[in-house]
Amino acid sequence: MKQILILLSLMVLLILPKQVSADCAELKNYTNWTLEDEHTIVFYVGNTPLASLNVPYCEIFPSSSIRLLKSYVCDSDNIVIDGKECSIIEVEVMY
């Protein structure tokens, strides 16, 4: 029985790695952000990238207003873009 549980756990980790191991990033010290595309924001401290956030259901422009709801963000958290609350689908840590 123990071997079956270990095997199932391993299969879940291999098949669904994004869902099992969500990335999170500390963004409280970010100084600026840039757009990678209309749905991806990269946050920086100076010239050092901290994290990339994928927000597919909200369009982001270079002039957009971005507000974090909390400083430590993870996959499936929310962010406010131009006054609209949007879901973060993926956080990619870059440090």
Image (cartoon, rainbow, N blue to C red):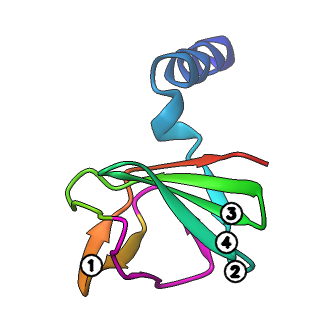
- Asked if residue 95 is among those painted magenta in the image, a careful observer would answer no
Closer to the chain start, of discs 2 and 1, is: 2
Which numbered disc, 2 or 3, marks the residue closer to the eye? Answer: 3
Magenta extent? 62-76
Q: Secondary structure at mark 3?
A: strand
User: Are the two marked residues, 1 and 3, in contact with CB atoms closer than 8 angstroms?
Assistant: no
- Residue 74 visible in the displayed image: no
User: CA gap, disc 2 to disc 1?
Assistant: 18 Å
Q: Amino acid at mark 3?
A: Tyr
Which residue occupies 43% across, 67% down? 77
User: Are the two marked residues, 4 and 2, in contact with CB atoms closer than 8 angstroms?
Assistant: yes
Q: Secondary structure at mark 2?
A: loop
Using the image, tell me which numbered label, if any, was put on residue 17: none
Q: Circle 2 sits on which residue?
A: 28
Nearer to the camera, 2 or 80 = 80
How packed mark 1 is, by other alpha carbons closer than 10 Å (few <14, some 14-19, many 20 or more), is some
User: CA gap, disc 4 to disc 2?
Assistant: 4 Å
- Residue 38 visible in the displayed image: yes
Which numbered disc, 1 or 3, marks the residue closer to the eye? Answer: 3
Side of 7 where 18 appears, left or right: left
Q: Amino acid at mark 2?
A: Lys
Closer to the chain start, of discs 1 and 3, is: 3
Using the image, tell me which numbered label, if any, was put on residue 85: 1
Closer to the chain start, of discs 3 and 4, is: 4
Q: Circle 4 sits on which residue?
A: 27
Using the image, tell me which numbered label, if any, was put on residue 44: 3
Q: Secondary structure at mark 1?
A: strand
**Residue 30 placement: quadrant:** bottom right
